[in-house]
Image (tube, rainbow, N blue to C red):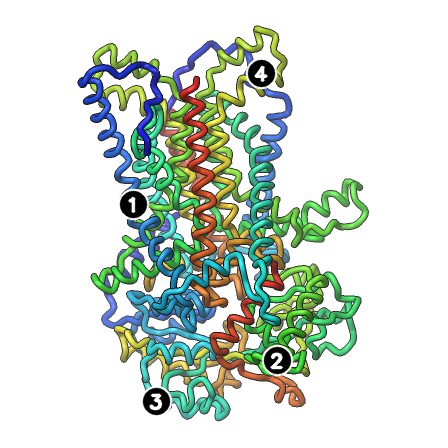
Amino acid sequence: MAEVSAMSEPTAGALEREAERDDNRTRWLLSLPAMIIIVLAAAGPLLVMVVYSFLTPGDYGNVKWEFSTQAWVNTILQRDIFDDTLMWADAHLSIFWRSLSLSLITTVMAFAFGLPTAWFIATQPPGKREFWLFLVTVPFWSNLLVRTIAIQELIRAEGVINNLLLLLGIIDEPLQMMFTNFAIAFGMTYVYLPLMVLPIYAAVDKLDFRLVEAANDLYASRWRTFWRVILPLIKPGIIAGSILVFIPSLGAYVTPRVLGGGKNLMFGNLIELQFGQGRNWPLGAALSLMLMAAVMVSLIWYVRVTSRERSNV
Amino acid sequence: MSEPIRQPRRGYSVRSLPGFAVVAVFTFFALYAPILILVAFSFNAGTSLAIWEGFSLRWYAQAAANEAVQEAAVRSLILAGVAASVATVAATMAALATTRTRRFPGRTMIYALINQPLMVPEIVTAVALLIVFAWIKVATGHTSMVYLISAHTAFCIPFAYLPIRARLETMDYTLETAAKDLYASPWKVFSRVTLPLMWPGIIAGYMLAFVISLDDVVITEFVKSAGQETLPTFMLGQLRRVVTPEINAISTIILAAGAILVSLFFWLSRGRR
Amino acid sequence: MKKLFAAASVLALSTTGVWAQELQIYNWGNYTNPKLIDKFEAETGIKVTITDYDSNDTALAKVKAGGHGFDIVVPSNSYIPIWVGEGLLMETRPDQMPNFKNVKAEFVDVDWDPGRHYTVPWQWGSTGVVVNTKYYDGDINTSAMFLDPPEELRGKINVVPEMGDVMSLSIMYYGGEPCTNDKEVLKKVRDGLVAAKQHWLGMDYGNLEKFAKEDLWAGVNWNGSTFRMRLQNENVNYGYPKEGFPLWMDSVAVLADAKNVEEAKTFQNFVMDPENAALISEFARYANGINGSEPFMPEDMKSAPEIVIPAELVEKGVFTPTCDPETQKLYTRIWTDLQK
């Protein structure tokens, strides 16, 4: 990693370099506990998966210790099971595409509802904000499954929403919402909403409203102020929220399966299938490492871009 | 707890954006609609989560008699409490280290590593942990909750880290610099200035970590040893068979406990102020 | 609140071990009658802890990895040869236990455990079709209900996402045997499933309410689950496909690395007692394999059409064998293609 100092001041003198080294050491020490925990109980064990992805599937799950690159090839190319022609693994690709678009929709919807909610909370008088924050998270103290079943109860043919709409005369016959993409999007947005609201709240809460006032005083319109002043200032919160919503929803499968009826696989289901009934652990490992690599590359790219932006300020 | 009010409040004009309050109220309503249904059906006389057959406390009675489900609920809460606490402390330290600085060697690596648990579907981490932890369990013969706690702590860290980091990134140095100029010790600067400023981010991070741990199924299912059932894994087993309102009753009790705890917490902190 | 604190103290106690003997059971979730456990504890003084799993594959992976601490597991028939082959089960010789005389003759010399050297019957059942006869009044004893559904039922069908069961049903519908690797049959199966899928609404578990409230009208389901649906809505009926349908049996086995072997054997013997077997059935609503349990069974189960297979269709039920790894791979591909 190239050590490019982002600071524009010239770093003259050994004393300053010494201070910089000390600072670096402190920063590493501070990050150490988090890194140790993650290496021991998340990232480290994943090395096993790297090894497994280069082995042969065991007869009944697990692996045989024979080297093979088959799993990696099969993530994108597969032989047709009937005429043995080599072709694109279009099942994997179309399932990935479905998960990707669903994650995007979820992120956008969580943002559309999450930003106003976070804003609302952060503009409450100090001391009342924590109360509203808790209100956002308390529903999630209930169990995931009963919560999902309750959501389904809302959207069933004879559920609350349909009955309400019928009562108000908006519709003449019940809408089919259960087991549709609408149900998945609704449920995913629900489940991931706090992950969007809390980081945005943490940023808005710190927003310096004098800047907003300044913009107002200079006769900027409300929306112009919003786009040009507010949004850039709370961007770190929005980005943190979007990462927290987008990435986990790529691998999500409980909510899409229960609410969407499970007719179509999500990428998470596809991987789970390989570790379960499919008994092809190497393929499952390869598919998930590919997903991780894609996410990791875009995240690192994002960190690079934002730190460059900051050094330009 | 309290934020110093940084500027005189000149009415709400700059703070309110058109339509935001309406969307926010709708969002809160939507968040609580399923919860109301969930709570309502915990009082169902029938065995169903969707067919109302009259009011009864039978599921509370059943939950009260079911030692296994109570143990699972308590275990879930303890696990989430411990994992979220450790994760939040570790994440706060890491966030302090990785924000508000020029790029230093390894910063990107630290950032990528801390967020790694987000990036793989749970089932993969679960299988990897199963294999590695089983080696340790066999080698040491030790099968306590320590495995579940460390696994939960690890995947909770990014959920705590990102809100705290977002908070830090929008914070300015001026107050800290001022404190330093007044010869406050580094620890004083941190505990009297930085920490209070970070507090909303830390609360947000802790609460996210807590609910994420409380909801985790897949990793728990693969890491748990004999007798370490949590509420979500208990529910997972029911998914294929029949889900009774007993679990609604348990959820309602936890929700109520949470609400009481929160009110108590605010009442006390207000009293102190 | 108080209850939770009480539970916390129970939690603390249970780890310190006030009971002299204990038994760790690893079973399917919500499958073990608490009354059965209470009775066992009272009769033997052995403290039982139950931990749940949600699929055969999870249970197999966990036990194989080691360090689990379980004594007893309850796998399905098609997995038992794998467990035995991997050396994970202990040869406890249930066939020499006092209560073995109660086991029904047809469940003694079973393919997956000839002569019952390892396992004891727990419950058994079938996978068939479910139809709400209010919406369709033709013959429902056919897999056509989901593979070539009648006009009336289209768009209201749910198929349980259980690869093995759905593949077996479909293969038998298209004239093959379960676990076949005959490409001609499998091609028909894949094309048939893919074509039928457009008429399905979902592929999901746990649809008791949705069938009871008529959000769903037909599909593939297990017999015991359908039985519970009918108790909620009398129009929901269970069909045994005349083309053939899979049977399954879960059996109690002791793990090779069990710590409490004697206690585990005591439990194996215990569940072969007719009264105890009836307790198992009463809770999960499936049949057991024990003679003489009928008098102790709940009234509504004794003649339930979901539990008692009609005489003319008994022959069509097949206990699914363990498919060889290559065939299993083909099935996974078909299954993925179906849901892509």
**Residue A55, above or below B166:** below
Q: Which amino acid does the dot numbered 3 rest on?
A: Met
**Residue A217, above or below C84:** above
The answer to the question of whether label 2 and label 4 lie on touching residues, with beta carbons closer than 8 A, is no
Name the residue that disc number 4 marks. Answer: A225
Q: Nearer the viewer, residue A21 or C249?
A: A21
User: Within 10 Å of the Cα at label 3, are there few (<14), some (14-19), or many (20+) other Cα atoms?
Assistant: some
Q: Position of residue B58 (x, y in %)?
A: 51, 59
Q: Secondary structure at mark 4?
A: helix
Q: Nearer the viewer, residue B72 or A299?
A: A299
Name the residue that disc number 1 marks. Answer: A37
Please say whether residue C279 is visible from this viewpoint.
Answer: no
Name the residue that disc number 2 marks. Answer: C245
Q: Which amino acid does the dot numbered 4 rest on?
A: Thr
Mark 1 — on which chain does it sit?
A
Of the image marks 2 and 3, the number of the one nearer the N terminus: 3
